[in-house]
Amino acid sequence: MTRLIINPNKKVSKINKEIYGHFAEHLGRCIYEGLYVGEDSPIANVNGMRTDVVEALKEMRIPLLRWPGGCFADEYHWMDGIGPKEKRKKIINTHWGGVVEDNSFGTHEFFELCRQLGCETYVNGNLGSGTVREMSEWIEYMTFEGVSPMAELRAKNGHEEPWKVDYFGIGNENWGCGGNMNPDFYANEYRRYQTYVRDYTADHKIKKICCGANVDDYAWTKEVLETCYKHSQRSPHGFMDGLSLHYYVHPEGWEIKGSATEFDASVWYKTMFKALYMEELIVRHANIMDMYDPNQEIAMIVDEWGTWFTCEPGTNPGFLYQQNTMRDALVAGITLNLFNKHSDRIKMANIAQMINVLQSVILTEGEKMIKTPTYYVFNMYKYHQDATLVDSSIDTEEIGTEEAYQVPNLTESASVDDEGTLHITVTNLSLDKAYEVDTLLVDTTFSDIKGDILTNEMHAMNTFDDPEVVNTKNFNGVEKTRTGIKFTIPACSIVHLTVK
Ligand code: AHR
């Protein structure tokens, strides 16, 4: 019998809804076809945005969307994407497949999409190949309300009212595709560029995100913060609101990556092991951040995370299209449990990427659309958004097929929402063993328990011919006990319980 202890009275931290954020880059079929089909498309749309996709994302309560990249961001010149569509510049998407980018999805379309989704906006600026003036004018274009050249241009292009930019990224992966900079150089550029990211509205401050490390590049974190805060008496507030971290799970390493759909038990556990490595990254980067920001005013922003496999055979290798199985679902489940547990430090995270690219929640093929196993995890976990993490712990044992890749069998997190309802999410990483979980709910009275479950064999996935193979079902096996609840979590599954 496994012991799970939850104390709903011991509040830990707020789980920012932005932890459940998403990322959409001009890459492959993410924006074009995935989200945006244009007003004249035979696919049902509102102002060019696919209705089926928008509805599915709303159901999953998408809280925030990051755009336009990724690597694309540091080559994106926003003026190419405004004005009459037929006059917009056609450029080559050099990073992603060398295809023609016709810029028909630009600033106005992004804000229209976020309006339809009802989500917050995270715009990523171009520091790598853009100028300070270009970045500053983009901010003016998007957010200035009065009389100014950029506000007038926006009105001329059909949008009198300014939009709200919630977060703004000052470059992306500037240690790599965003200019191959060293940390000291980037940090000085950050200091300069961020100066001109002005807050034009007194009651709405743009949160500025500084480019953080690639995986375990702790030197980057240290040196960027050192340069940013050296010779500066400023507090982080208004200067740097977040520092990003990017980490992708490649089970077989960056070079080989490995198939998204064909893998054995040993690759399964290796994938879980690598997903759990996220915790070490969070703790070690946070320790460095604490040295420069002891009051923890700078948030950790994991603005790219997820699985990155070898792209689907027969597809454009520059499009990063991959299928999504129960393995992706488990990676999502354990990562989101981790983010919840570290929600004192992590204030935003964006899975990469929303549609048709890497670990997507939605896949499309022409007019067809399917929800992936990862979608269902986000849908089950949505109740944690803006809830309060409460103290919990679970007994675990090490499992796996190889000595070097042993993982805990179970992970969990629990939160209490505004109505006082307790939400518990538990993942079982084992491929062959169910566990009986005896849950102690400390000082808790309740009358109603509900559950849903996502479970299947490890390779199970949804396809365009068979779109409902993996889907959530009611989980009826939860029993009330004298001190809490008891349930058996099947192998390879994710459970969400609601206790009122
Ligand atoms: O998500 C795909 C790419 O991964 C992004 O463009 C880049 O930021 C990262 O290397």
Image (cartoon, rainbow, N blue to C red):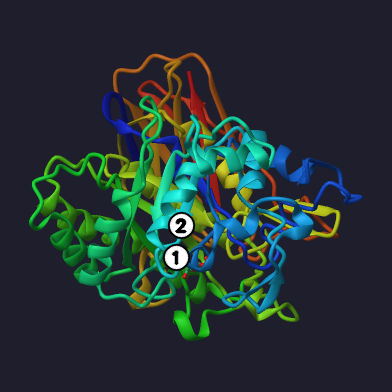
Coordinates of residue 115 in the picture (x, y in percent): 63, 34
Question: Camera-side residue: 180 or 119?
Answer: 180
- Disc 1 secondary structure class: loop
Q: Which image quadrant: the N terminus?
A: top left
> In the picture shown, does residue 349 fall above or below 58?
below
Residue 278 horizontal side relative to residue 261, left or right: left
Q: Is residue 87 visible?
A: yes
Q: Observer-nearest residue: 107 or 138?
A: 138
Q: Say which quarter of the image contains residue 345.
A: top left
Which residue occupies the foreground of this view, 132 or 184?
132
Q: Name the residue carrying label 1.
A: 130
Tag 2 near tag 1, CB within 8 Å: yes
> In this view of the protein, can residue 2 be seen by the observer?
no
Q: Which residue is drawn at 75% across and 81% down?
A: 314
The x, y position of residue 89, in whole percent, is 69, 65
Crowding around mark 1 (Cα neighbors within 10 Å: few <14, some 14 to 19, many 20+) is some
Q: Residue 134 carries which label?
A: 2
Callout 1 amino acid: Gly
Q: What residue type is labelled 2?
A: Glu
Which residue is most to the bottom? 255
Q: Nearer the viewer, residue 161 or 447?
A: 161
What label does residue 162 carry, if any? none
| Mark 2 Cα-neighbour bin, 10 Å: few <14, some 14–19, many ≥20 | some
Give coordinates of residue 30: x percent, y percent.
67, 60
Could you tell whether 246 is left or right of 90 in the image?
left
Question: SS for tag 2?
Answer: helix
Judge whether 478 appears above or below 173 on screen.
above
Residue at 54% of width from left, 38% of height from top?
A: 151
**In the visual, does 73 lie left or right of 184?**
right
